[in-house]
Every structure is written in C-alpha cells, then in structure tokens.
Image (spheres, rainbow, N blue to C red):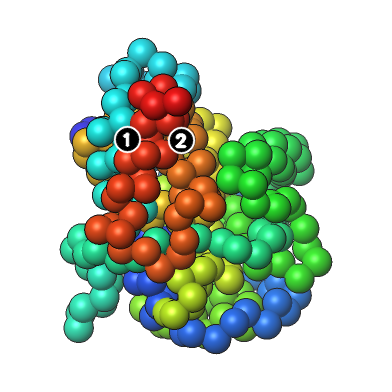
Amino acid sequence: MARRASARFLMAGAVCLALGACEGLGTGRPTSPPSAPIPAVPTEPTPKSAAASRYYAQVQQVLLRESMLRTDPGTDIPVSAEALTENFLRIALFHEFRRSNTGIVRGETETQLTRWTVPLRVSLNFGASVPADKQATDRARIASYLARLSRLTGQSIALSDAAPNFWVYIVSEDEREAMGPVLNGLGLDIRNDVIETITRMPPTTYCNVFGLSGSETHTYSAAVAVIRSENPDLLRLSCFHEEIAQAMGLPNDSPRARPSIFNDDEEFALLTDQDEMMLRMLYSPELRPGMTATEARPIVYSLARRLTGGDS
C-alpha cells in the first residue's frame, strides 16, 4: 500500500480554511447553539465500522514498517532560516484546495494570512460507538495538546462546552455518514458540498477540518473537525495534531516541508520543532491578519532568523 493512499487532506478542512471567506460555511458569525446530538448507533461495531478498523490498522502497520509516522520532533533534520521562511509562506499563505463548478478540488491558490484573535473554546463530541476508556484517553490527549498550542501561540485554547467555537467530533463510519443534521444544527450555514465531503469521506481520508473566517477581517470565528474513531492510536493522535494545528491558520501542505506534519508523505505523525516555529510565527504580533505573502515575507524571514538562531 502506498503511504500516500492515506492523504489526510482530501477534505473540506483545508478547503474552508483555504477559501479565506470560507464559502463553505457562509459568512455569518456562529450562533453557538448547543451541539447537536450525534445520531445513536449500536455501541457494538457494525460490520462497516469493523472493516474500517481493520483497514486503518493495516494502514498504520504499513506506514510504521516504512519508518513513517515518526513521533520525535525531527531534531536530526536541520532547518535554515531560508527553508523555514519558504515553508511558512507556502503553508500559511497558500491553500491546497479550491471550489470549482464541480465541487471542491485540488488546486493551490495564494491567500492572505488568517488566524484566530478570539479565545478558542473546543467542544469535544464522541459518537455512542466510542468506548468510555477511549473517550477518556482522547480527552486527556486533546486537552494536553490544546495547552501546548496555547503556550506556542499565546492564544487562549481549552476544552469547553460553554459557547464553543470549535467542535471536534470523533465518530464511527455509520455516525459520520449520518452527521448532516448534526452539522446543520451548529448554526454555521455550512454548504452542502462541505457536508458531503464529511458524510461521503473516502477511505483515503483519516480526518478533516474546516473553518469559518471573515472575508475582510481574515480572522477565524469557528471550526469543525471530524475524526474517524476507527483510526488506531497513533493515526488517531496524528489526526488530533494535524487537524487542530491546521485550524489555527496553517491550511496548506508542502512536500518540501521537513520535518513537518504539514506534508502529505506521512513521515511525521506529531507536531515537530519546525511546526512549532511556524505556529509561533503565525501568531507573532509582527504579522497581522490579511497580509499577503509579499507583505509578510521580510517579516517572516526576520522571525525565522531569530527562531533558528541566525540572528540575535
């Protein structure tokens, strides 16, 4: 099995984050209604979910056998200020997807810097099929990761069901296919083509994320991530790391970004040292929402030199 058969980003996540004005969601602000309940399914795995669990276990085994899904920070791979600059500009200021007459398709386009300026209140929602012990593990891992992202970016980020603006769903095959009413119930005016990328998610997609941003403010006001519960532990954790970090404002991938989770080759499963530097740069007060790549480049290079030790 080719490792790229599991490209995580064939999804609305990068799309809506990528489309700046977030055409997939509409342009209104979220109304923060209570999370819509996930339709109940038998707590025992259905044949479809059991087959998916076997498939993703095999995917993980193949990737690990090929020395992929590394969990180290990539300190063995040097990153120059020049490389960090180019990687940041490509990942933060370009998008992997665009909307066409036939739907959401691959097609890299330049955009403007977009990030959060309000506290992130993350509502974690599990399908009834997810066992209690796995729910507890996932909740602890996500809470720890959010605290790490908060330290890196200076943003307030935490689990909260009080007026959430970032919803994370961990659901089985059957639950995900029935999520249309759940997504519509969030009051975000999500477009049908975005909903279909979730309910009809192909097997080659482990998880996805999409977000709502203002076309003039270039700031995010809402995001939704959907993660397959059939993913085994490491793929599941890698989804947490990548989808939530992407939703912070790093929507693209680059094959040149190494070490990084923002690379479809699946070499790294978890946030790397370079990824941390890119998040610090994204939320630096020296940059501002709405900047183009041309405007941001000299500032990004200055930040990169300082972060890599090339400048005092």
Q: Which residue is mark 1?
A: 84
7 and 85: which one is in front? Answer: 85
Mark identifier at residue 277:
2
Q: In the rendered image of this protein, does residue 140 appear above or below residue 90?
A: above
Whether residue 35 sits left or right of residue 180 in the image: it is right
Kindly check if marks 1 and 2 are in contact, taking CB atoms under 8 A apart as contact.
yes
Inspect the image, locate mark 1, and give the three-letter code of the amino acid beneath it.
Leu
Left-right relation of 4 to 280: left
> Which residue type carries mark 2?
Met
Residue 129 on image: x %, y %: 65, 52
Name the residue rendered at 71%, 71% in the picture: 35
Q: Residue furthest right?
A: 162
Q: Residue at x 64, y 47 (%)?
A: 154
Whole-percent x and y of residue 273? Answer: 45, 27
Examine the rendered structure and indicate whether residue 183 appears above or below residue 225. Answer: below
Q: Secondary structure at mark 2?
A: helix
Quadrant location of the C terminus in the rendered image: top left
- Is residue 184 visible in the rendered image? The answer is no
> Residue 65's x, y, as percent?
33, 18
Of helix, strand and loop, which one carries label 1? helix
Residue under the image location 22 percent in, 64 percent down: 109
* Numbered mark located on residue 214 in the image: none
